[in-house]
Image: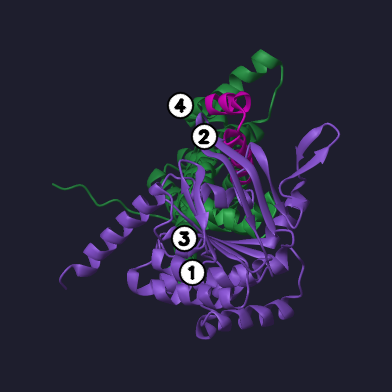
Amino acid sequence: MTEAAYQWNFQVIWEYRDVFLRAMGVTLSLAGLTIILGALAGLALSLLRMSSHRVVRWPVITWVELLRAVPPLVLVVWIYYCLPILTGLTIPAFQTAVLALALYSSAFFSEIFRAGLQSIDRGLVEAASSVGMSQAQAFRRVVLPLALQRMLPPLVSQCVLVVKNTALAGYIAVADILYQGQQISMQTFRPLEVLTTVALTFLALIIPLTMAANVIEGHFRRKYYR
Amino acid sequence: MNSPLLSIRDLHKSFGHIEVLKGINIDIHKSQVFGFIGASGSGKSTLLRCINMLEVPQVGSIRLAGELVGFRDTPRGRKPLPARDLSRQRRRMAMVFQHFNLWPHRTALENVIEGPVVVQGMDRDQAREMGTTLLRKVGLEGRVHAYPSRLSGGQQQRVAIARALALQPEIILFDEPTSALDPELVGEVLKVIRDLAQEGMTMIIVTHEMGFAHEVCDQIVFLADGKVEDLGPPAHIFGEQAAPRTREFTRRYMERHQIEMGRPE
């Protein structure tokens, strides 16, 4: 005897559409804030790390290596539970998640920026100096645009990772899409439909991101490198 | 003779413990074409790069029309020049690099006008007109809007020369302009340099092209171990009166060249 095939019923998703939409908003703002803050911090870290002063460079290297070595969930949980005990500073769950994920991703962003900036041929900067450009002009008009083109693929992968890592925020009860999905599936006993929807939501967020990146990358390649 | 356009005095440059230039003295007058020759490691490229401060010399001085390059003398000693003044001096001594160093995200024309527009604030339309004229002058009127990756090495180097000319420099510094080129592309670049010499442009050319140096240069500097071993017109450098090391160097070059030319096709 075979068991009866599972009866899918996506009605439950429609019933909880408001909750899903709100959770999606939470996930998107988590990801957006994390990417902005993480990338800015990463840029700052990468510039400090390329400093000619060892006193500046070494603390930054240590800090980046520490951040990279800690699992992001541990970082989220530690900032949520341990930081208040140590400092008396209580941070709400959402802000904690943004802080932890931004710190974590800043280490990776900084390595992407450093690799990208350092990959630009020194001769191109010398050419800029030779026509009289200042260091700032050479950075803005030569180094940065070329480095950004080269950094685009790793930057997009890092953004994809940030979007995925937002799912960790549910661990400290931030009402993101996974957290809400689990709540709904417990209430409705429909985990297959609900969690499949959660997974599809992530696909819907991430696939357009990578597709757009591929289009932009192809555009640059065709334009400048035949 | 009137005062020199470029005057190099007792120039020393070290990288760490290695002294690359050991007291160089050279005077270059307006409309002269100087060739710097010598074995690799003799310091000829470093000397060229010191002239427009891509490398900063430790001792000695370079003067452009009497003006100290890269530094200013103050009551408390010699201080590096402020960035703005250095930029102004560099524009008077345009540089053409061995590997062209064109900006890959700019078209040929944009490479040429970038300096005048961004640094000197030249009007964009006026700059385009000037850039187009210069590209025509180097024989690239058809490739104005091409990106560097679509140009041959010889074409890229000619764009680089147009970029140098766009600064309206008093002197152009060439750092082995044909060393990175396929042999069949060398001629088109040398022709442009030859034309500039005929127009009276002051130039310094670091080169391994002895035949070209012989033909175009007014004076040739032979550098060895960071010193000026020999200096004189081509007839002297390539003649019997040259210093022993110079003769050794040019003789070995000629031998190698003849062997290559004598090789069966």
CB within 8 Å, label 1 to label 3: no
Crowdedness near tag 1: few (<14), some (14–19) or many (≥20) residues, C-alpha within 10 Å = many
- Foreground tag (3 vs 4): 3
Crowdedness near tag 3: few (<14), some (14–19) or many (≥20) residues, C-alpha within 10 Å = some
- Foreground tag (3 vs 2): 3
Of helix, strand and loop, which one carries label 3?
helix
Chain that appears green: A
| Image spot of residue A174 (x, y percent) | 59, 36
CB within 8 Å, label 2 to label 1: no
Residue under the image location 73 percent in, 80 percent down: B126
Mark 4–mark 1 distance (CA, rounded to whole Å): 47 Å
Residue named by callout 2: B19
Residue named by callout 4: A69
Main SS of residues in magenta: helix
Q: Residue furthest bottom?
A: B142
| Image spot of residue A29 (x, y percent) | 62, 47
Question: What amino acid is labelled 3 in the image?
Answer: His
